Amino acid sequence: MTKSALANHIKSVLILSEEELSEILSYFDFHKLTKKETLLSAGKLCNRLFFVEKGCLQLYFIDDLGNHKTTQFAMEHWWLTDFLAFQNQKPSNFYVETVEKSKVLSISFSKHQELLDKCPKMEKYYRNIYETAYGAALMRLKYMNSLSKEEMFFMFRDNFPEFVQRVPQYLLASFLGLTPEYLSEIKKKQLS
Amino acid sequence: MTKSALANHIKSVLILSEEELSEILSYFDFHKLTKKETLLSAGKLCNRLFFVEKGCLQLYFIDDLGNHKTTQFAMEHWWLTDFLAFQNQKPSNFYVETVEKSKVLSISFSKHQELLDKCPKMEKYYRNIYETAYGAALMRLKYMNSLSKEEMFFMFRDNFPEFVQRVPQYLLASFLGLTPEYLSEIKKKQLS
C-alpha cells in the first residue's frame, strides 16, 4: 500500500480513527521517483512539502562559485522543504532532489492549510516533527562549533551508520563541508 | 502587566477568548532576572522551556578545551531551551543564561504537556514557532556553508542590526565562530 509509511508515522504520534487517517492521507500526492529527480528548484515558489516513504532526498543550494552544497538529507519518515519559504509562500532558497530511487508524498501549501483546518490534530503531529527537527539542528550547530570536520565524520558514522553507508561520498563530503578527496583520506587513514 | 508580550505573541497566531488566553498564561512562571543568571545547566534534566518577554538569553556549551561557545540567542518573543532534551526529558546539552537584564516566562515539561492537552489550540502556536525556527536554522546552515566568517558578520549586521548592537562583542564572536580579536579587526577594517 502506498502512503503506509506516513500512516504509521502519524499513528506513532496521534490517536486517530481509520476514517480520520484515511481522510488525512487523501490530501497527499504519491510520487515514484528515480535517482536525481528535482522536486523543488531554487528561485521558484516553494509550494510543496515532502515526506519520504522510502529512499532519500537532499536539500541543496548552488553557491556563487557554482558549487553544489548539501544542507540537509531526509531519509525514511523525514519531512523536507525550504520551511521558511514554504511558510511564507516565497521563492525557495534551495533545491530538493532525490539521492536514490524514492517513494515520496507531497502536499501543496493550500492543501496543507486545508488539512490543518479540517484535522487540527495534525498540528500536534507537525509540532512534534518540527520540535525534533529544530532541536536536532541546534545539536548539529553545536557539533559544527566544537568538532573538527574529521571528528564530524566519525560522529556521523557512529550515530547514523546507515546514512553514511547509503549517501554517495561526494554528497556526504558536501554535507560535512569537506572535499571528496579529504573525506576519502580520512576514511583511508582510519583503515590503515 | 507581566506576561503581556506572550499574550500578544499568542494572539498574533491564534484567535482566543480572553478567558482562554488567561488560562494559558496561568501555566507560566514569571522571572525578573539580572545579567548572567543561569536558567538551565548542561548535564541537568532539561525540564523548562523559556520565553523572552524582554531582554536576551543565550544557549551555550563549554567545549573540551573549556571554551564558552554560543549556539543560539533569543531576544524578545523567542523561545529557548535544549529542545531535544526537553522533548525527551533528558539531561541538557546546553546552558541557558541571560545576556542582559531580562523578563522571562518559563513552563515546566509537565505543565507544558498539561497546557497542550487542555488547550490543543496551542499546538498550532508551537507548530508555527518551531516551523519558523527550523526553517531559520536551515538558512543559517546554508550561510555557514557559503559565506566566510567575515561575510557572516556583515550578513548578521545588515539583517539583524539590533542583535549586533545589543549582544556583547565576545558573545557575538563566539556565535560566529570567530575570536573576539578577529571580530574587532573586521569592524576596524570596515571603518577605515
Image (tube, coloured by chain):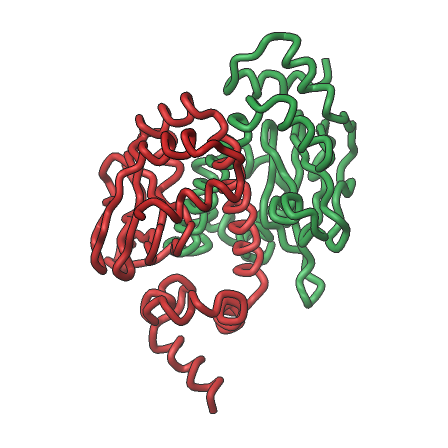
Chain colours: A red, B green
Place of residue A104 in the rendered image (x, y in percent of width and height, measured from the top left)? 30, 48
Place of residue B12 in the rendered image (x, y in percent of width and height, measured from the top left)? 51, 17
For the residue pair A164 and A112, the one nearer the viewer reads as: A112
Image side of residue A15 versus residue A116, left or right? right
For the residue pair A79 and A188, the one nearer the viewer reads as: A79
Place of residue B46 in the rendered image (x, y in percent of width and height, measured from the top left)? 72, 46
Compared to residue B155, the image places residue B108 above or below, namely: above
Q: Residue at x 65, y 42 (%)?
A: B81
Task: Using the rendered image of the protein, determine whether residue A165 is visible from the camera's viewpoint.
Answer: yes
Which residue is the extreme one toward the top?
B18
Task: Using the rendered image of the protein, determine whether residue B151 is visible from the camera's viewpoint.
Answer: no
Q: Residue at x 68, y 13 (%)?
A: B22
Compared to residue A8, the image places residue A118 above or below, namely: above
Image side of residue A24 versus residue B161, left or right? left
Q: Residue at x 42, y 50 (%)?
A: A77
Place of residue B73 in the rendered image (x, y in percent of width and height, measured from the top left)? 60, 41
Q: Residue at x 53, y 71 (%)?
A: A158
Which residue is the extreme one toward the bottom?
A192
Compared to residue B170, the image places residue B98 above or below, namely: above
